[in-house]
Amino acid sequence: MSTKVKQAESTEVVIKDVNKMTVPECAAYLEKSTDTIYKMARAKELPHYKLRNNYYFQKRFLDRYRERQQEVMMEQIEAKWQLEIEVN
């Protein structure tokens, strides 16, 4: 099963295997640059595995990463709103 995702410059990247996504595929899927993906992988911010010096990603783990990021963002927004309510 392949999945198509749009890259920033209106080109499409075809993800051939959602269990073995390459850095460019991951970058297109997460809408980030390949440099950012490499940095995040090296910093262990993104779940990945490495084969022969190449990084690979699984879609299901990237989906969980996205969900966690959204949860963190919502918590930050709620905390900010709570502070504004307490101040007023």
Image (cartoon, rainbow, N blue to C red):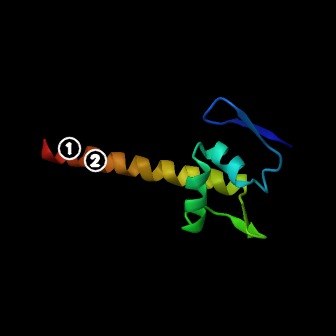
Expressed as whole percent of the image width and height from the top left, the position of residue 71 reads 47, 51
Expressed as whole percent of the image width and height from the top left, the position of residue 77 reads 35, 45
Identify the residue shown where x is 60% and y is 35%. 8
The residue wearing badge 1 is 84
Q: Is residue 43 above or below residue 74?
A: below
The residue wearing badge 2 is 80
In three-dimensional space, the C-alpha distance between marks 1 and 2, rounded to whole angstroms, equals 6 Å
Identify the residue shown where x is 65% and y is 29%. 10
Give the residue at the far right of this rendering: 1
Check disc 2 and report its element: helix, strand or loop.
helix
Answer left or right for 81 relative to 22: left
Answer left or right for 80 relative to 61: left
Which of 78/54 is in front? 54
Check disc 1 and report its element: helix, strand or loop.
helix
| Mark 1–mark 2 CB contact (< 8 Å) | yes
Q: Which amino acid does label 2 sit on?
A: Lys
